[in-house]
């Protein structure tokens, strides 16, 4: 299974390559939230603003909530993902949408159809009523299985989430999870939406589509002792998810040279990764790079998997000749763990690649400042 289309919308930029370049340069786009204020002292006389990373108010106003906010975030990402897909193939494409902004709420497809009618949205799509943080990777794995079984011509897997609504920020505030001057181990709340177009490699070759990456394997497991519970996590779930994914590779993961995880500043999440890191590779002595985009882009909850995928696709494009495989990992507060392994796509000259990136960026209007 291969990736031939990808779209992303984050506070770092309105497209996949805008965000990827910002992540590469570690250029954040954060601000102090004016609604959520935290007391520095018990009396509450000194206040500080919580740091968040949200899309420009010109693009997604703060008054948009629920399914309307989800549609405003997701429509540009889907448009970018399907930009090079024919209308005939769009009508044959299956859809899987992970909507964390308004789980179980109806009307998303209708709103998306109004904002992007050229995308040929279906009348219904596969949606879980109570999605988890790992569902984006889980749905990619399910889509790959459908394609392998010839049950679909192509599949779009999309996700959207926002931790920047007043309700979500308040919940994070009372949970003590927001990052500020007195809580360096908190998270920088963010929002994002992403969409990936998957198809069989043979079909992509026949229609002459550029292959961004290949889906090598995936894995999923549940942590019996999540860090939100009474006892400390033993990283059993994360280790099992990696072993499932690496067990499908010809070298059991020895060729993985880059790891991209959803570490976001929370200490329990970092401790769990520290436990799993030494257990998952057949050659643990090899030095590997570790990236965690949430430190730059912020934690966008259930859509963070799309940000990780964007970072992986960009690195595979920039280092096609030196990088064989990339592994991505996400973890849910309630115990679910997901892993996705990617391989490089089409190899092309670096100058040609950079010229194509510059051409894509020049076609887009500038990204408005977040004011």
Image (cartoon, helix red, strand yellow):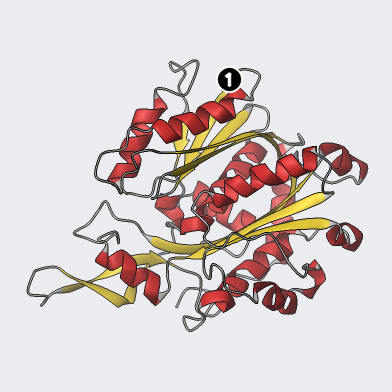
| Quadrant assignment for the C terminus | bottom left
Residue 288 image offset from top left, x and y in percent? 47, 26
Q: Quadrant of residue 157?
A: bottom right
Residue 171 image offset from top left, x and y in percent? 33, 68
| Quadrant assignment for the N terminus | top right
Q: Which residue is mark 1?
A: 252
The number of numbered badges drawn on the structure is 1
Secondary structure of the residue carrying numbered label 1: loop
Residue 358 image offset from top left, x and y in percent? 69, 55
Q: Quadrant of residue 320?
A: top right
Task: Report the residue at 47% width, 18% height from top.
Answer: 286
Towards the viewer: 10 or 249: 249
Circle 1 residues within 10 Å: few <14, some 14–19, many ≥20:
some
Residue 258 image offset from top left, x and y in percent? 53, 32
Residue 212 visible from this viewpoint: no
Q: Is residue 138 above or below residue 161?
A: above
| 1 displayed left or right of 241 | right
Towards the viewer: 40 or 108: 108
Q: Is residue 275 above or below residue 36?
A: above
Residue 74 visible from this viewpoint: yes
Towards the viewer: 320 or 186: 186
Towards the viewer: 285 or 353: 285
């Amino acid at each position: 299974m291969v990736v031939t289309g990808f779209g992303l919308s984050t506070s770092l930029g309105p497209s996949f390559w805008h965000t990827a370049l910002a992540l590469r340069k570690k250029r954040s786009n954060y601000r102090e939230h004016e609604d959520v204020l935290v007391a520095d002292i018990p009396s509450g006389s000194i206040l500080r603003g919580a740091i968040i990373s949200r899309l420009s108010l010109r693009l997604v106003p703060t008054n948009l909530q629920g399914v309307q906010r989800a549609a405003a975030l997701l429509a540009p990402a889907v448009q970018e993902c399907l930009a090079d897909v024919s209308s005939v193939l769009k009508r044959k494409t299956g859809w899987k949408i992970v909507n964390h902004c308004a789980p179980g709420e109806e009307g998303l497809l209708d709103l998306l159809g109004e904002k992007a009618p050229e995308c040929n949205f279906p009348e219904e799509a596969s949606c879980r009523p109570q999605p988890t943080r790992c569902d984006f990777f889980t749905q990619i794995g399910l889509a790959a299985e459908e394609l392998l079984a010839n049950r679909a011509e192509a599949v779009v897997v999309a996700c959207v989430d926002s931790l920047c609504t007043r309700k979500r920020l308040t919940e994070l505030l009372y949970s003590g999870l927001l990052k500020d001057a007195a809580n360096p181990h908190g998270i920088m709340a963010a929002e994002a939406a992403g969409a990936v177009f998957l198809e069989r490699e043979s079909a992509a070759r026949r229609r002459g589509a550029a292959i961004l990456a290949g889906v090598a394997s995936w894995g999923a497991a549940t942590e019996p002792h999540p860090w939100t519970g009474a006892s400390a996590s033993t990283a059993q779930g994360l280790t099992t998810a990696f072993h499932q994914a690496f067990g499908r590779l010809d070298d059991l993961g020895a060729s993985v040279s880059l790891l991209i995880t959803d570490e976001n500043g929370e200490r329990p999440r970092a401790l769990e990764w520290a436990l799993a890191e030494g257990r998952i590779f057949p050659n643990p002595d090899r030095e590997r790079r570790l990236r965690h985009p949430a430190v730059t882009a912020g934690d966008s909850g259930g859509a963070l998997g799309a940000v990780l995928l964007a970072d992986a696709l960009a690195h595979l494009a920039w280092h096609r000749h030196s990088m064989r495989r990339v592994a991505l990992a996400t973890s849910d507060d309630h115990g679910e763990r997901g892993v996705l392994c990617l391989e490089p796509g089409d190899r092309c000259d670096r100058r040609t690649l950079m010229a194509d990136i510059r051409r894509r960026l020049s076609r887009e209007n500038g990204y408005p400042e977040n004011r």
